[in-house]
Image (cartoon, rainbow, N blue to C red):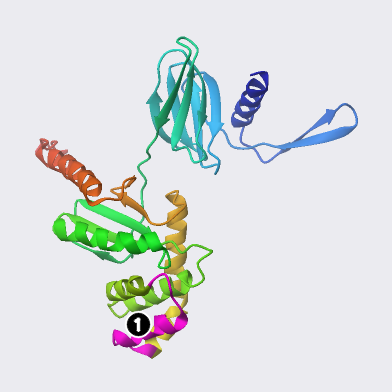
């Protein structure tokens, strides 16, 4: 317990160091020197009791004396507040911050809480099906060589068929490093999109996935009647490569670690079944309906 307290004290000290580029030097036992590069800081609304970082370093959880856990991004942006019972004196988290563990000294209890984060997935320029102004956006991060992604594709098609006027399904690439042809397939699909055939190419890739090869990819382009010269040029163009890079960066920003990962209006789907996804859609539609029914605020002219 003393070791944990020392770690907490050290972490809190580093958190509150003033922002500066200066280096501080200190003598240690008169034999060596330790250099500290001062990092960033932000002001807390209450006295901290405990602090933990997610394993990826992207989230900071701080327990305060006001019986709250404050959740921050590493840059100090407050993501939210979690109310906890009086007596909670120590916290810990699962590697990515998806679970929060609480120790309560008052009643000698341990609590395991699941934590969800609403993320803002940038869908600018990404291929999609459904109305442009749909109230519900489903963003799916996919690898064309992923077996589970292939199984998710027809599921999302069912979702689209069931919600043609209210749901927009957006495709985001997330090629995994260990899949040899995932990147070429992603580039090929985006290149096909330059000729208006992204979704047709998408379907053909999953029809033969996970056994992909350059021959298969070129065969799909021929089958779909693409301009092969343009298709080949687009596959290696800086703009197509940038689109793929952006998708990968967006996946990292959203905390995506595997495929397929699906978000419904920024909420991560945990149960990839038609009924579970439809439940999330209906929940979002209900929110949207409530917003439309709220009385309008008067403008600056009082109208």
Quarter location, residue 282: top left
With respect to residue 34, does 270 lie above or below?
A: below
Q: What residue span does the magenta drawing correspond to?
A: 209-228
The residue carrying mark 1 is 220
State whether residue 133 appears in this view: no
Q: Residue at x 30, y 63 (%)?
A: 153
x, y (%) of residue 250? Answer: 43, 56
- The answer to whether 24 appears left or right of 53 in the picture is right
- Residue 107, visible in the rendered structure: yes
Name the one closer to the observer, 164 or 179: 179
**Which quadrant holds the N terminus?**
top right
Report if residue 215 lies within the magenta region. yes
Q: Which corner quadrant holds the C terminus?
A: top left
Q: Is residue 234 magenta?
A: no
Q: Residue at x 55, y 41 (%)?
A: 55
Residue 286 in the image: above or below residue 80: below
Residue 193 locus on image (x, y percent): 32, 75
Residue 292 is left or right of residue 198, and the answer is left
Q: Residue furthest right?
A: 31
Q: Position of residue 118 (x, y in %)?
A: 35, 42
Q: Position of residue 225 (x, y in %)?
A: 29, 87
Res 18 quadrant in image: top right
Q: Nearer the viewer, residue 44 or 152?
A: 152
Q: Dot 1: what SS?
A: helix
Q: Residues within 10 Å of mark 1 (few under 14, many from 20)?
A: many
Give me the residue at 37% from left, 85% from top: 219
Name the residue rendered at 19%, 51% in the picture.
135
Left or right: 251 with respect to 154? right
Residues 88 and 34: in front is 88
């Amino acid at each position: 317990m003393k070791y944990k307290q020392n770690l907490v004290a050290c972490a809190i000290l580093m958190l509150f160091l003033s922002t500066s580029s200066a280096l501080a030097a200190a003598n240690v036992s008169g034999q060596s020197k330790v250099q500290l590069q001062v990092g960033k800081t932000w002001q807390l609304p209450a006295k901290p009791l405990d602090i933990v970082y997610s394993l990826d370093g992207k989230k900071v959880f701080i327990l305060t004396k006001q019986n709250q856990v404050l959740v921050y991004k590493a840059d100090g942006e407050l993501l939210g507040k979690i109310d906890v019972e009086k007596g909670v004196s120590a916290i810990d988290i699962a590697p990515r911050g998806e679970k929060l563990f609480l120790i309560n000294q008052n009643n000698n209890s341990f609590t395991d809480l699941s934590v969800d984060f609403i993320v803002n997935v940038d869908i600018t320029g990404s291929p999609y099906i459904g109305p442009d102004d749909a109230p519900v956006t489903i963003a799916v991060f996919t690898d064309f060589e992923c077996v589970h992604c292939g199984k998710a594709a027809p599921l999302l098609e069912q979702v689209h068929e069931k919600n043609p006027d209210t749901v927009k399904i957006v495709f985001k690439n997330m090629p995994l490093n260990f899949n040899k042809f995932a990147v070429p397939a992603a580039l090929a699909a985006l290149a096909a999109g330059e000729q208006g055939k992204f979704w047709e190419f998408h379907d053909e890739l999953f029809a033969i996935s996970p056994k992909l090869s350059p021959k298969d990819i070129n065969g799909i382009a021929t089958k779909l009647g693409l301009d092969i010269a343009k298709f080949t040029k687009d596959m290696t163009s800086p703009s197509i490569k940038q689109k793929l890079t952006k998708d990968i960066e967006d996946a990292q920003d959203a905390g995506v670690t595997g495929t397929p990962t699906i978000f419904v209006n920024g909420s991560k789907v945990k149960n990839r079944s038609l009924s579970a996804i439809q439940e999330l859609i209906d929940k979002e539609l209900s929110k949207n309906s409530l917003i439309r029914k709220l009385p309008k605020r008067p403008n600056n002219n009082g109208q």
